[in-house]
Image (cartoon, rainbow, N blue to C red):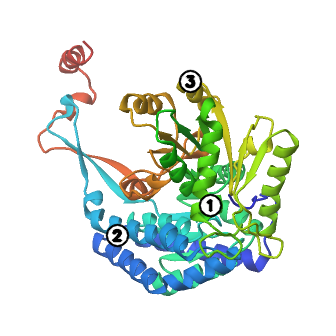
Amino acid sequence: MAAIIPLKRVVSPSVGEAIDRDFQRLHRISRERPAPTAAEREETLGRLHQGLRSRKEEFVRAIDADFGHRSRHETLLGEVFLVLQGIQHSRRHLRTWMRPQRRRTSLPFLPARSEVRFQPKGLVGVISPWNYPLQLSLLPVASALAAGNRVMLKPSELTPATSALLADFLRSTLGPETVAVVTGGPEVGARFASLAFDHLLYTGSTQVGRLVMRAAAENLTPVTLELGGKSPAIVHRDYPLHHAAQRIAAGKFFNAGQTCIAPDYVLAPRERVEAVAQAICEAVESSYPSLATNPDYTAIINERHRARLQGYLDDARDKGARLCEVNPAHESFDEQGHKLAPHILVDVTDDMAVMQEEIFGPILPIVAYDRLQDAIRYVNERPRPLSLYYFDRDERRVDRVLQGTVAGGTTVNDTILHVGQDDLPFGGVGPSGMGAYHGREGFETFSHKRGVLHQSRLNAAKLLSPPYGRAVETLLRVLLR
């Protein structure tokens, strides 16, 4: 999620001029030096990797300050580790990815030779959100650099300490001829999205994604949109309840639910709804015996988002949902920053705000289903999710769910772990996104696939040129049979 970009707001002249200077400088360099060698790209990625390793604790402190409290271990696992792993994966495979791909040449044009070459697109723009301000900034930046591009980054204004550190880190690590960081509020984001990039990646809400795509369309800029939505977790009645509850709780309450691929709601067999709710409550209590001063439990990013989440709870209660607040130590959060206790909801209905909007917080509704086909239908009647999770050890049913639903990505018998697999594409579908990155898909997203035909010295191309005669007539009869 991210702040709405109001496309009609304008930045001050001085800020606008600075953004334009960064754009023009990197755009010019991307044309003057359009294709960094494999060695140059590996060296750039190496500096990024080493720089992040050496300054990781600075990022831990900055993100903690922006959130009011962010678990140190969640930052190291969910941000630093994933970025370092992703950079190393790109470095190891870069030369293979860059290698031209041989393609089949149509029979009438033999002995010509066909291939696809991967070229940098030029200057890539990246707009990153606040919930994982390091990971969702540096992973796409690293992918764009691996593809040989220059990059401009616009991090979120809701994480100012991290954004300032990113600007200093990238400037000192890679230099102004490789990357620029633009900081500021929604009006800066609007100006940024309107620049004529060669590719633009945006991560955030579906609502803002529409505005970004509209701005990019003015320049015919291709876009990759990493959005959100309501990602379901389906639990089959035969699956061990305790294990499902543990893994759902782990994925849901990591970063206090402020994760785009967190389970947004659970589909549970009708006769097991109460048991599922109880098991998840117990799993949360085991992980977080206290909340207010617990270093493992992350705060909500700011008071506005905490109020939004409280509004979901109030609306659900008023409309008949039963709320289970998981607060083992019976603490009060009035004086404890922006923390919000985990809540499990049952008896939810579609008219509740919590079932209409992406939750993005520590609230987990449980929806009853009767047959597995009913759960599949429930998912398919709604916008396609960024992720879907299914708990079942029957491979035929697993395949039935995978074949019968469409989602950006899936982890079977666990949650959120597919995002950490560098050889899997990460991206949404429909309202949850457009395009993908991570690993090879990231390299290809930020590369232009250039088709090349190498004509041979001996060839029959002259037959295809006027003046046409009997030879062409004979050839056409063969080709058009």
In the picture, which quadrant includes the N terminus? bottom right
Q: Nearer the viewer, mark 3 or mark 1?
A: 1
| Residue 127 image position (x, y, % from top left) | 61, 63
Number of marks in the image? 3
What residue is rendered at 62% in x and 50% in y?
A: 228
- Under tag 2, what secondary structure? helix
Give the residue at mark 3.
Answer: 371
Q: Amino acid at mark 3?
A: Arg
Residue 43 figure quarter: bottom left
Q: Amino acid at mark 1?
A: Glu
Q: Which mark is residue 285?
A: 1
Tag 3 or tag 2, which sits nearer the N-term?
2
Q: CA distance from mark 2 to mark 1?
A: 36 Å
Question: Quick check: 395 above or below 17?
Answer: above
Q: Residues within 10 Å of mark 1 (few under 14, many from 20)?
A: some
Q: CA distance from mark 2 to mark 3?
A: 44 Å
Q: CA distance from mark 3 to mark 1?
A: 30 Å
Q: Nearer the viewer, mark 2 or mark 3?
A: 3
Q: Residue lying farthest right? A: 318
Is residue 113 found left or right of 150 in the rendered image?
Answer: left
Is residue 291 found left or right of 99 in the rendered image?
Answer: right
| Residue 244 image position (x, y, % from top left) | 51, 46
Give the residue at mark 2.
Answer: 88
Q: Amino acid at mark 2?
A: Gln
Question: Quick check: 475 above or below 440?
Answer: above
